[in-house]
Image: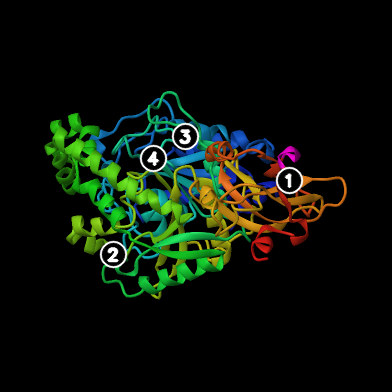
Amino acid sequence: MLPNSLDLATLAAAYRAGLKPSTLFAHLHAEAAADTHHAWISLLPEAELLARARALDEQDPASLPLYGVPFAVKDNIDQAGLPTTAGCPDFAYTPAADAAVVARLVAAGAIPLGKTNLDQFATGLNGTRSPYGACRNAFDPAYISGGSSSGSAVAVAAGQVSFSLGTDTAGSGRVPAAFNNLIGLKPTCGLLSSTGLVPACRTLDTISIFALTAADAASVFGIVRSFDEADPYSRPAEPHGRRFPAGQPFRFGVPRADQRAFFGDEHNPALFADAVARLEGLGGVAVELDFEPFLETARLLYGGPWVAERYHAIQAFIERQPESVFPVTREITLGGAKATAVEAFDAQYRLRALKRRCDTVWQDVDLILTPTAGRHPTIAAVEADPIRLNTDLGYYTNFMNLLDYAAVAVPAAFRPDGLPFGVTLFAPAHQDLPLLELAARWQADTGLPLGATGQPFPARDFPTLAGADGMVQVAVCGAHLSGLPLNGQLTQRGGRLLRAVRSAPEYRFYALAGGPPQRPGMVRVAEGGAAVEMEIWELPVRHFGSFVAGIPAPLGIGKVALEDGSLVCGFVCESGGLAGAEDITHYGGWRAWLAR
């Protein structure tokens, strides 16, 4: 029996119950071939597709992490044996090998159904700029699907594949997700290999992932994330940093109210306000931000010399065959030929200054929440005013890769007209998995159905976060406590208060001689000890060394026993440094002693 949903948990259960991949893929090929949304450019021939599926029929479904999972490939990413058109028939070539990310998915047991429609040469955020037809929204064919990864999003939303690969330079992995009720992961640039990708802006491109659930996106991301020596822009994953688990408070930024743009839409402002309230309900504290540095950065992408990269990517082709390029794409791309080297350097200098300003927000917030797009126009409206409306779509997305941030687009609500509304969570580079983990909590809280199929959100455990988080917990008990003189040594290094605790009742507590500021000393004793009030702070490992280096004798960092029996890094004191110290054990903590 065919599953009612293609999310990974439901599909895996169907395979365990006896479903054969060949049965599923025969059905999916027919569904994709009959698609009326212009989602596909080419499909793997049915005989070849079924041969791949039959090769899995007799294997154990538990033998491969993506056993028999159907996926789609945006047609600017190579899939061996099918033409790569980049949305331009005259540009097409047939690769002999899969792109690096496609190869990793196939090795994990996934099967690509075919190549999906896109804004030509990945230039656009609307999905109408294609000679293969304007890709239609999965909920209402009169509305745009979002682009440039239009077909990849619609194929997932329509239930024809479990997930798909897109690309994202300016929002192409997020806007289509918002318009089709999907998760859209825009990974940290460089974590997914671009080998086998037709570039749009090579320094800014990343392959992206569309999925029905955040847990599915995380599973796929864990398989395709890999350093690639053959890709000059590839980089290894770094510790992913702060997580957002249930029960742990966090701070999130939102654009200042007067900087939120909805371009005349009457429903989305209230839906975004509801989204802010929802994130608060998940443990967040909203902080209004001056969003102008982000908006100025966004304007650099198409208003600055980065358009020259789009020209560079297809220079030989567009100069030789300009008539083969979609008219609005040709206009935008040829505009890049006019940029000078001086303008490019000026823009790079301005970007560095803006990034410095934008990055200061991470001292105050852990992530930022925005609408993914301010409004959702019809295909007719975009075709009548293609450049202005496309620019509007990039208001909340165009700055992301220029600033080197990670982002996840998540479904937020359905509008009164039945169209989906989505928001984006973003944070510094390498925060992909924590953002997905928070997105999974968000999805469970909204309870929205999956894609355009109407199937209910499935209960599924979030995949284990791979790799170290790059954070260390440290227990403090004196002048480093919240609001006291040395607390800035923690906050200036990105430290965050986790919770108040008490030590095990095994310590004598002293106010050491010297100062200001006065410092405490905790000495573990075999008898006569007491519990001491403390705070647990979380600190990035990369800053922990400088923090420890500034600790004066007789203090140091060791393991402190807590009341619950656990051990955590914290301040300890050498007993030989207690000359002139005052024993304050009976106060039970530093604040009580200060208030004596």
Q: Quadrant of residue 535?
A: bottom right
Q: Residue furthest left?
A: 338
Dot 4: element = strand
Nearer-N-terminus badge (3/4): 3
Nearer-N-terminus badge (2/3): 3
Circle 4 residue: 206
Circle 2 residue: 377
Dot 1: element = strand
Q: Position of residue 397 (x, y in %)?
A: 34, 53
Alpha carbon distance from label 2 to label 3: 32 Å
Main SS class of the magenta portion in the image: helix
Quadrant location, the N terminus: bottom right
Give the residue type at disc 1.
Val
The span shown in magenta is: 574-578
Q: Is residue 333 left or right of residue 449?
A: left
Give residue 214's mark.
Answer: none
Marks 1/2 in contact by CB < 8 Å: the verdict is no
User: Does residue 73 show up?
Assistant: yes
Dot 2: element = loop
Give the residue type at disc 4.
Thr
Question: Of 209 and 7, which appears nearest the observer?
Answer: 209
Circle 1 residue: 560
Give residue 101's mark.
Answer: 3
Question: Of 63 and 294, which appears nearest the observer?
Answer: 294
Q: Judge depth for marks 3 and 4 and give the one in front.
A: 4
Give the residue type at disc 2.
Pro
